[in-house]
Image (cartoon, rainbow, N blue to C red):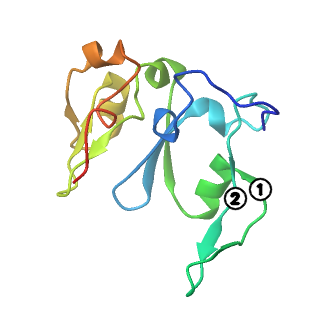
Amino acid sequence: YPLKPDTDMHRIHLDCYFAPFGDKYCLLWDELIRVDTPYQRMVIEYKRDLLGNYKRVSEIIPLFQYLIKNHFNVIPISTKSHLNYGCNILELEDGTVLVQDEESHKKIKNAIFVPFTEIHKMYGGIQCATNII
């Protein structure tokens, strides 16, 4: 994984390259499926005990391997989709998924496309523009 933080605005937040939805489905930037990618993201899993303390319960593992190990159905998206906030989706309580990218729209069954290009100019997407109450 990178020795220094990756501060690119298209990769700085998890929701820029990964999006879980439904029952064990997720979108993932296809670059992160490659073992030799310079953009590798690593996972360390922690669990909270009954006293509220967190304990490390896993070794460091690449994100894609973690998802496969935990039985996620990984739907890869291209770099073009990634740069268009293809992973920045919003799942509503009823399971409806709002997307702002054509590729993601085609890959998620019954998704609703919402044009959001003006917000993209501010380095944000549909999830970024919401506030969960």
| The N terminus - image quarter | top right
- Examine the rendered structure and indicate whether residue 59 appears above or below residue 74: below
Q: From mark 1 to mark 2, how far is it between C-alphas? A: 5 Å
Q: Residue furthest bottom?
A: 50
The one nearer the camera, 61 or 124, is 124
Q: Residue at x 19, y 27 (%)?
A: 114
The residue singled out by tag 1 in the image is: 60
- Nearest to N terminus: mark 1 or mark 2: 2
Q: Quadrant of residue 115?
A: top left
Residue type at numbered disc 2: Ile
**Dot 1 crowding, Cα within 10 Å, few <14, some 14–19, many 20+:** few
Q: Quadrant of residue 55?
A: bottom right
Question: Contact, CB < 8 Å: mark 1 with mark 2?
Answer: yes
In the rendered view, does 71 fall on the left or right side of 91?
A: right
- Examine the rendered structure and indicate whether residue 30 appears above or below residue 131: above
Name the spot of residue 87 as percent of width and height, x first: 42, 35
- Examine the rendered structure and indicate whether residue 25 appears above or below residue 1: below
Total numbered circles: 2
**Dot 2 crowding, Cα within 10 Å, few <14, some 14–19, many 20+:** few
Q: Residue at x 71, y 72 (%)?
A: 57
Report the disc number at residue 76. Answer: none
Name the spot of residue 62 as percent of width and height, x first: 71, 48
| The C terminus - image quarter | bottom left
- Examine the rendered structure and indicate whether residue 53 appears above or below residue 97: below
The one nearer the camera, 129 or 82, is 129
Find numbered disc 1 in the image and state the secondary structure of the residue it sits on. loop
Q: Residue furthest right?
A: 3
The residue singled out by tag 2 in the image is: 44
Name the spot of residue 6 as percent of width and height, x first: 67, 28
Find numbered disc 2 in the image and state the secondary structure of the residue it sits on. loop
